[in-house]
Image (cartoon, helix red, strand yellow):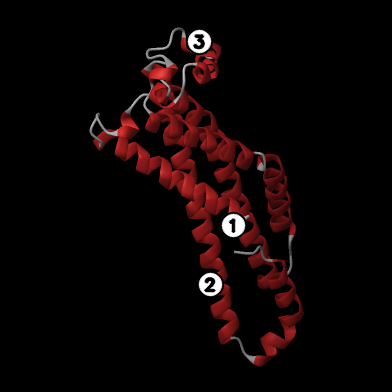
Amino acid sequence: GKKKHTMETIIALARNGLCVIVDTMPVEHVVMAPIKDFFTESSLIWIRWLGAFFLPVSAGSVVPLENLSLIKVFIAILQLCAVYYNLIGSFSIPETYKNLKIARRRLQKTTSSTSVKVGLEIATFRAESNLAYGFARLLLGPSFFVLALFTLNMITVTPVEWALLFMQIALAAALWAMTRDLSARRIKANNARLLATANDKDLTQFQDEIFAVIDDLPAE
């Protein structure tokens, strides 16, 4: 819902802001200090255990986890949040694909008036858009996980290059999804213009199915 998208946007803005700060902040600033400076020796045990747990993944950590700066830890946490939101968003792919097939099949078989076809065209464009967004999220989730591991200095740069490549593919899918959204809005706007300029006879003839299609249109 809107609340989830709002939280996701806030997390993305915070993550990007911290990435800018880590590149511009003086090294002597408190947020650039290693996290071990903020914990007692006994409380560092779980941090060292976490670093040892990821050791097989990293094939040897470049920097021990406890020596990471505090701001990098926050960035990694926000990147892991992005993993969660994107993978959750990709779960809708099977249902969206099913809806797309239904909309396309009905659009091909329909012999109804223009208003019905408009509703089916809009439903098809929006299903295509949602499917592309789901595919983009499916690529972004694992990519952010790789970036989180790199932020924690647990992997080398090679996996990051692949992750960035997948992110570019996800961006292309998202841009294509936007074109589907724009097509749906254009058709809806054109249909509204036709309805506004129709004569009374046309409105009387098609008013029942027109209102039925409008009621079935997905919410913005």
Residue at point 62% right, 90% down? 199
Residue at point 72% right, 77% down? 211
26 sits to left or right of 73:
left
Q: Which residue is mark 2?
A: 189
Q: Which residue is mark 3?
A: 55
Within the image, what quadrant is residue 164 found in? top left
Q: Which mark is residue 2?
A: 1
> Where in the figure is residue 166, as x and y percent of width and height?
46, 30
Q: Nearer the viewer, residue 56 or 104?
A: 56
* Mark before the other along the chain sequence, 1 or 2: 1
Residue at point 51% right, 27% down? 145
> Where in the figure is residue 210, as x and y percent of width and height?
70, 76
Above or below residue 115? Residue 154 is above
**Residue type for callout 2:** Ala
> Where in the figure is residue 64, as x and y percent of width and height?
41, 14
Q: Nearer the viewer, residue 115 or 90?
A: 90
Q: Please rate how many residues cluster around mark 2, counting C-alpha atoms within 10 Å: few if below 14, some from 14 to 19, many from 20.
A: few
**Residue type for callout 3:** Leu
CA gap between label 1 and label 3 equals 39 Å
**Residue type for callout 1:** Lys
105 sits to left or right of 53:
right
Q: Which residue is situated farthest in the bottom direction here?
A: 200
Mark 2 or 3: in front is 3
